[in-house]
Image (cartoon, grey):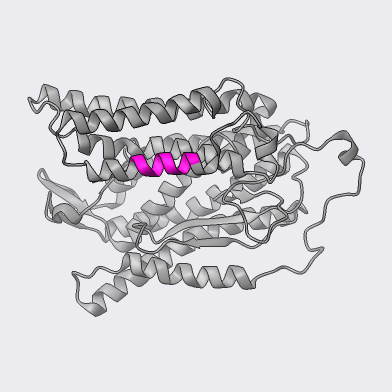
Amino acid sequence: MPALPPDSTDSPPPSATPSSELAASELTGPPPPRAGSAPLAWRTNAWLFAATVGSVLIAGYNTSLPRREALFEAAQFTGALLSILLSHEFGHFIAARIHKVDASLPYFIPLPFLSPFGTMGAVIRMRSVIPTRRALLDIGAAGPLAGLALALPLYAWGASHSKVVPIGALGDEGLQLGSSLVLRTLDRMFGPTVPEGMDLLLSPVAFAAWTGMFVTMINLLPLGQLDGGHVAFSLFGPRQNRIAPWVHRSMIVFFFVSVASFVMRDIRAGLGFWHFGHHVNNSLFWLVLSEIVAVLGLLSTPSRGQADSDDRLGVRTRLFGVIGLALLAGLLRDETSPLAWSAWLLGLGVLLLMEVRGGSLRPSSTLLDHPATGPEPLKWGRTAIAIVTLAFFALLFMPTPIGL
């Protein structure tokens, strides 16, 4: 997950790396704290990690299996997933320490019962400024690349130990997991042959590796202070602040395109709009993520709210709006009434209109701007690393990550 910026509070906000651009007077002031200049706090991190282990075990426990088998599969899922997340976060941490950037240990975020994975990942707090684009690249890219170095072989092994089952064998409880170019390649190379009318039921290790790649895909979005935003800014410099808003808007456009493509497929098959609710729910991920990214933009530094004073929505309004729409869409999933879905679309229109008038969709919005760093461009070796890291977003991209 992205690293947290310098913050004066005791608890870390859920956002990403460095601080805002320094004023000229700050540049001539005392140097930022160096890594290792203060004792490394670990107690809170340890408690959160222990809670996350328990939360992920609960998420991986399959109550339909015998107890011993269920515990074994839950342990496999937990060990594989947390190994990937630890590799990701310590990739950031070690790169930060190498560049003398003061960084905390990872703060893991347990999420029992509400998440199919049992966690929202982890974040790291950066307590000093990232001084150069080279350091920004190293810190931003180290996490995704370290996580993928473990997720890819784990998925290959897990796919080879997965089962082929009839389509629909799991009933309504099974999730339809999205696929990507990387996943399809690994399935062909290591997974069993899947005949017509059958589907691949991922083993716990493969599901954990799929989750790791899903999280990496999100982090590699080239906007804001996500890992992909760090890498893109190190590559493009201030031009990245003109690219990021278009990436953000494309997520909202993709939501509508996804729903429309599903509906058009049904119309051609003579099904009309009977499954409209299912299609909205299966496409909702991109709409929700677009609002979460806007929230992260507000929380990325303690002073961000004052820096972008024209933003009138705030965190609570965005979260209330998007969570309300998501919950209502879930309740209306099997609803075919045009009136009910017209009301839902009206609510969506109101939220988007507020974003256009006073939020992240304003042309003048700076919510997704990346803090400035040193002007020296990357050399060819690190430029290649930046391009490869961003290319992984395309290779991991899942149009519909989770289908219900």
Depth check: 388 or 399 in front? 399
Give the image location of residue 158, x and y in percent: 32, 59
Taking the spot 39% from the left edge, 62% from the top edge, the residue there is 118
Q: Is residue 350 left or right of residue 360?
A: left
Residue 155 sits above or below residue 244 on the image: below
Depth check: 346 or 403 in front? 346
Q: Residue furthest bottom?
A: 68
Q: Is residue 131 left or right of residue 116?
A: right
Give the image location of residue 67, x and y in percent: 23, 78
Give the image location of residue 96, x and y in percent: 70, 53
Depth check: 205 or 361 in front? 361
Taking the spot 26% from the left edge, 56% from the top edge, the residue there is 202
Give the image location of residue 204, x and y in percent: 31, 63
Q: Is residue 379 left or right of residue 228?
A: right
Q: Is residue 385 visible?
A: no
Depth check: 357 or 76 in front? 357
Taking the spot 37% from the left edge, 58% from the top edge, the residue there is 117
Q: Residue furthest left?
A: 270
Q: How many numbered marks does the figure carry?
A: 0
Taking the spot 27% from the left edge, 61% from the top edge, the residue there is 161
Question: Which segment did they paint magenta?
Answer: 317-325
Residue 401 sits above or below residue 119 on the image: above
Confirm whether the magenta stretch covers residue 323: yes
Q: Is residue 319 left or right of residue 94?
A: left
Q: Looking at the magenta stretch, what is its main secondary structure?
A: helix
Q: Is residue 291 visible?
A: yes
Q: Residue furthest top?
A: 363
Confirm whether the magenta stretch covers residue 129: no
Residue 164 sits above or below residue 75 on the image: above
- Residue 170 placement: quadrant: bottom left
